[in-house]
Image (cartoon, rainbow, N blue to C red):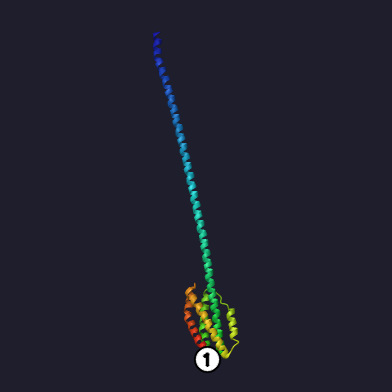
């Protein structure tokens, strides 16, 4: 009996210790499980933040691409507008150059043809001499103008402009003193127009070659104008 009691005295404390340690173990396991869940939640939250950050970065890149596309479009639009303005200015300048060449070429041919007619049909020797000067000087003007036009691929018409052709026809119906008076009066008016035209282009023209040409010929035209006025006044 004493032996049984001794055995029980040994077993009961062991049993009690075992019972007491099991809840602690269970609580420890539960605590570990809770920490694992918390860690997983935190990791999931971190992954969500990473996804959100990547989405934001992708959105920023899309905005950058859109901004660059808009800037490129603005540059293209601006460039096209500038090209249109340049083309318009180039066409306008080309038109002014063509008009100047055409008018000068026609006027030069008129001066040469009338000069030849004056040498044969004028009564005054001064008028005949003036006609010879017109042929000589305006032939040179025509040759230089033709050379410039060829370099710029501009074709000079063979025919006179209507105004010049009408004047030629009117004067070729006259001879002698009547022709002398009419011819010299027209030469004063014609050279005034020439001087104004050449001076304007020499100062404001757009083509450097033609500006140089106009400035070079201006003194000759002024000399012609003075001579024409002197001869015309002698008939009054």
Can residue 153 be seen at all in this image of the molecule?
Answer: no
Determine which quarter of the picture holds residue 95.
bottom right
> Which secondary structure lies at badge 1?
helix
Q: Which residue is mark 1?
A: 125
Quadrant containing the N terminus in the rendered view: top left
**Location of residue 38 with respect to 3 vertically, above or below:** below
Q: Residue 12 or 54: which is nearer the viewer?
A: 54
| x then y, percent, for residue 180 | 55, 88
| 130 to 56, vertically: above or below | below
In the shown orientation, is residue 12 left or right of residue 151? left
Report how many numbered discs are placed on residues in the image. 1
Left or right, 56 with reference to 176:
left
The residue drawn where x is 51% and y is 57% is 74
Q: Farthest residue in the front direction?
A: 236
Of residues 158 and 22, the one drawn nearer to the viewer in this rendering: 158
Kindly identify the residue that appears in the image at 43 percent across and 28 percent down.
31
Q: Position of residue 216 (x, y in %)?
A: 47, 79
Reply above or below: 104 against 29. Answer: below
Q: Residue at x 52, y 91 (%)?
A: 125
Residue plotted at (43% across, 22% down):
23
């Amino acid at each position: 009996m004493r032996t049984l009691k001794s055995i029980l005295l040994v077993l009961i404390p062991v049993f009690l210790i075992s019972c007491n340690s099991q809840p602690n173990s269970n609580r420890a396991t539960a605590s570990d499980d809770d920490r694992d869940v918390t860690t997983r939640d935190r990791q999931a939250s971190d992954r969500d933040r990473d996804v959100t950050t990547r989405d934001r970065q992708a959105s920023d890149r899309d905005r950058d691409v859109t901004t660059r596309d808009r800037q490129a479009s603005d540059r293209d639009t601006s460039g096209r507008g500038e090209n249109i303005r340049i083309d318009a200015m180039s066409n306008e300048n080309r038109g002014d150059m063509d008009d100047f060449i055409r008018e000068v070429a026609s006027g030069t041919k008129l001066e040469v043809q009338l000069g030849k007619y004056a040498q044969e049909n004028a009564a005054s020797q001064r008028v005949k001499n003036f006609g010879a000067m017109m042929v000589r000087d305006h032939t040179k003007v025509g040759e230089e103008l033709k050379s410039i036009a060829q370099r710029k691929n501009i074709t000079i018409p063979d025919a006179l402009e209507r105004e010049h052709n009408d004047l030629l026809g009117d004067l070729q119906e006259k001879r002698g003193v009547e022709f002398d008076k009419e011819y010299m009066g027209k030469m004063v008016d014609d050279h005034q127009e020439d001087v104004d035209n050449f001076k304007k282009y020499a100062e404001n023209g757009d083509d450097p070659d033609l500006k140089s040409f106009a400035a070079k010929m201006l003194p000759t035209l002024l000399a012609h104008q003075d001579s024409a006025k002197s001869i015309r006044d002698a008939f009054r």
